[in-house]
Amino acid sequence: MEEQNKPNNRLTTPHFNFNWMFAIIAIVLIALYFADGGQSVEKEVSYTKFQTYVANGYVSKVVTYSDNTLELYITSNHVKDVFGPDSNKVGHVAMLTTHVPSSDAVTTFLQQQRITRHFAGEESYAEKKDYLTAILWQILPILFFVGIWFFFMKRMGNGAGGGGSVFNVGKSKAQLFDKNGQQIKTTFKDVAGLASAKQEVEEIVEFLREPQKYTELGGKIPKGALLVGPPGTGKTLLAKAVAGEAAVPFFSLSGSDFVEMFVGVGASRVRDLFKQAKEKSPCIIFIDEIDAVGRARGKNPSMGGNDERENTLNQLLTEMDGFGTNSGIIVLAATNRMDILDKALLRAGRFDRQIHVDLPDLNERKEIFEVHLRPVKIDESVDVDLLARQTPGFSGADIANVCNEAALIAARHYKSFVEKQDFLDAVDRIVGGLEKKTKIMTVDERRTIALHEAGHASISWLLEHASPLIKVTIVPRGQALGAAWYLPEERQITTKNQMLDEICSLLGGRAAEELFTGQISSGAMNDLERVTKQVYGMIAYMGMSKELPNLCYYSNEDYSFNKPYSEKTAETIDAAARDLIAEQYERAKKLLTENKEKHNQLAGLLIEKEVIMAEDVEKIFGKRPWHSRSEEIMEESASKEKKEADNTKAGIDEAQEKKDTADTTTEENEK
Ligand code: ATP
């Protein structure tokens, strides 16, 4: 998601800064500590005075310290005589201090006083007390714990977002976009294709702008719309466009924003979000990746009944059904996984509308390219039609990436414009990964890879339903040692025969290796993985096998520990998968043996040229007798390109002719 449009007007309500409260608590704690000893009035007296107090029999205890200081404790019935008017402030410890000439002198003096019975109290000697250290030792642990407490409170507060305090943890983390704050600049013009989805969301904006138009006729404004589709197809973009176009406040947040480590926080955030939304109504709430909270309840393995996520979802369900239809809050949400969402969330009255945002088709890809090519400096060689044709199965996000990657490739070569080849390289890079020309390979390895790739290319050329080939290479890319590019048919349903042909051409690589090198290699692992997945899908989910016809064992439960079929069925599925793959492998081998010469010629050409295009394959195998729709489109535009090129050439020739005639005329005139 783009960052640029983030507003800074996060929802905050004025609140008391609780940091002050913590500081006050700390000060009170420290004050209490001091308050304990603070009862006594400390007073220093001269040594002579000390001697007088002892001689008068006022002293109950004497402590002499190593640094020649002395503490004398006054008996309670003489406090008044010593402290006078201050005596009521003295508290329960009436103590005085003095400096003494030496501890020996004190001992001698006290002995004399004992003899004369003026002193009968305790007498002791102690090392000097270091008050500062003593205080520090007592305070440090308190400070330490107060510090830790502050730290965690701060962190929890930050986790809650916004307020920076633990007391805001239950507040909603939604960002608000409205005309008073920063606004989103994305509009419907930035969303290419997706005509029907766009129309639906445009209508939602319309509902909020002119509700009476609908309510007058007795219609109710929908409460929510769910944008569903594969990643990168523009769901968030569409919601952003709604925010940009709607003249109403727009709250945006992600499903995971409800999740916190404290129990009850999610539900409280949902409540807070709807409370704020009600204040701003009419408005839109957008929850991206709603599956984070909207998963079906009771389907997770944690045994605790009081699951936090479930509470959050329950609260969301209540809030969505808790406000009147005409209160003017519309909830938009986006997800890639509608299958795992709770059914209660999807029912009419909550998300009334489900808007499907699918992968773009040829024309939509063209429109998306046009949007993303706007800021890119391109030259006239770039043909948007060709780019759209070369990118089947690409999402909007992939196309945006192609445009960016092409610009980077062009910049790397110090070009002043991005050319057609840069775009084609970008597509290849995105599909296959980075080219690794420097990877060291032995001659044998190169031959094996060439035979393998030629195997794929030959079979896909020879089978009616296999995707038509665009190009084959033995230059390593990403993790792959070689690659073949196809133009997959853009179909809504796939027949069993089409699947079998695809499987056969995927197995063509391994079959070619076995037939023409006599060995099999690790190079086919990726193909085999895809084949195995596809075959198991055909048998267990699509009911396409002879053994288990018309049965679907698909389960959308996330944590199902049990297979929805018996052990015996599992064995049947395994056996059927093995048979089907073996059958297609034999078919691939048969086809390759029948076309051995042509295949080997193709492999030879690959070793020589490293990259070969569909035209080269056509030269060897002849024209394909079947025509897929995508091939037709390719041919149509190729002939269009040729025509345009011829026209341009004719134009140039004509201009040249004119120029020649002009030159001759000038020459003649000169003569
Ligand atoms: P996810 O489900 O993974 O969150 P998404 O469907 O929300 O994906 P977006 O974030 O909307 O996908 O799209 C990513 C980027 O792809 C956009 O920022 C935009 O650049 C580009 N894009 C996708 N679809 C379109 C489109 N129809 N028109 C123009 N650009 C598009």
Image: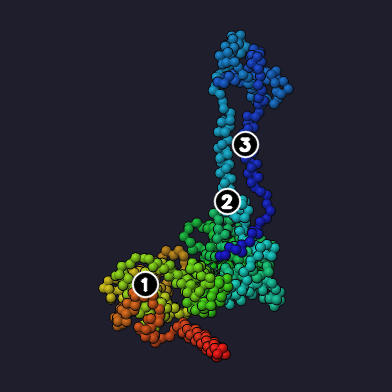
Residue 42 appears in which quarter of the rendering?
Answer: top right
Q: CA distance from mark 1 to mark 3?
A: 76 Å
Type of amino acid under label 1: Ile
User: At which x and y percent is residue 416?
Assistant: 53, 70
Question: Would you name the residue on which mark 3 appears?
Answer: 30
Neighbours of disc 3 within 10 Å: few (<14), some (14-19), many (20+): some
Secondary element type, mark 3: helix
Q: Position of residue 281 (x, y in %)?
A: 68, 65
Q: CA distance from mark 2 to mark 3?
A: 25 Å
Label total for image? 3
Q: Which mark is residue 156?
A: 2
The quadrant of the picture occupied by the N terminus is bottom right
Image quarter in which the C terminus is found: bottom right
Q: CA distance from mark 2 to mark 1?
A: 55 Å
Do we see residue 631 in this rendering?
Answer: yes
Relative to 305, is 61 above or below? Answer: above
- Image quadrant of ligand 1 equals bottom right
- Residue annotated with mark 1: 474
Decide if ligand 1 comes within 8 Å of the CB at mark 3: no
Name the residue rendered at 30%, 81% in the picture: 597
Can you give x and y, in whole percent of width and height, for residue 206 in the image? 67, 74
Going by the numbered disc 2, the residue's amino acid type is Met
Q: Write the residue at 57% across / 46% down.
A: 151
Q: Which-is-in-front pick, marks 2 and 1?
A: 1
Of 264 and 358, the residue lying toward us: 358
User: Residue 234 — which label?
Assistant: none
Q: Earlier in the sequence, mark 1 or mark 3?
A: 3
Mark 2: give few (<14), some (14-19) or many (20+) Cα within 10 Å: many
Q: Amino acid at mark 3?
A: Ile
Does the CB distance between marks 2 and 3 fall below 8 Å?
no
- Judged from this view, the residue extending furthest toward the right is 85
